[in-house]
Image: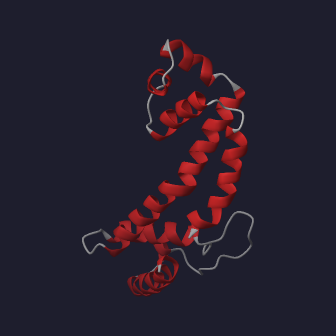
Amino acid sequence: MVQLLFQPLLWYYNTAVNNDLSDIQKEFVRYLVRERCSASKAAENAGYAHPRQRGYELLRKPNIARAIRAEQQALLNGDLTSIAFGTLKDVMQNPKSPANAKVAASRAVLEAAGFFKRADEDTPLLEKDPLNMTAEELEQFVLESRAKLNVLVN
């Protein structure tokens, strides 16, 4: 859901940022961010002669720096967000996960969904932090969290 909401905006931003890059520069940025390699290796994979020197030079160009940030943001808002929520869901649903891991995963999902007080808000949506709940309160919290998670992911 999050990925779908941000996709058009990211496409526009990435298109605007990448318009001033050559094809080989775009490949450099892609290798650097998506393949997590060094600047030298990214320059080599992109097809630059003298990749060590070119990687060093490319990292100092403002348009390349903007493109790297845009690519990182696109990765974060796309694949990595889906993986992170999938991991949290797996932890919460795995019967072998320790209770503290389930609580931490539940809290992370609910924070992302806006169920907890933010720094700029006066009142939290939950009356009590899960870490301070009794066993009965925690059990009820987990049941309600699962129901809310099912609504979010289905």
User: Compared with residue 86, is residue 129 higher up or lower down, i.e. above or below?
Assistant: below
* Residue 141 to residue 63: above or below: below
Q: Which color scheme does this rendered protein use?
A: secondary structure
What residue is shown at x 64% (from left), y 61% (from top)? 6
Left or right relative to 34: residue 74:
right
Instruction: Find residue 88 and report its horizontal and vertical position in percent.
Output: 41, 66
Residue at the far front in the pictured view? 23
Q: Which residue lies at the image location 60% right of the left edge and 36% below the top edge?
A: 68
Q: Which image quarter is the N terminus in? A: bottom right
Q: Quadrant of residue 37?
A: top left
Pick whichever, 97 or 47, lies toward us. Answer: 47
Residue drawn at 70 percent across, 63 percent down? 119
- In the orientation shown, which residue stands out farthest toward the left? 96
Q: Please give the name of the residue rendered at 65% of the width and 53% of the height, measured from the top-left corner.
A: 11
Quarter residue 122 falls in: bottom right
Residue 14, percent from left and from top:
66, 46
- Comparing 20 with 113, the one in front is 20
Check the image and report above or below for 15 versus 32: below
User: In the rendering, at what x and y percent does residue 89 appear?
Assistant: 40, 70
When asked about the image quadrant of residue 65, the answer is top right
- Above or below residue 60? Residue 73 is below
Q: Nearer the viewer, residue 77 or 102?
A: 77
Q: Position of residue 30 (x, y in %)?
A: 52, 37
Q: Is residue 121 left or right of residue 136?
A: right
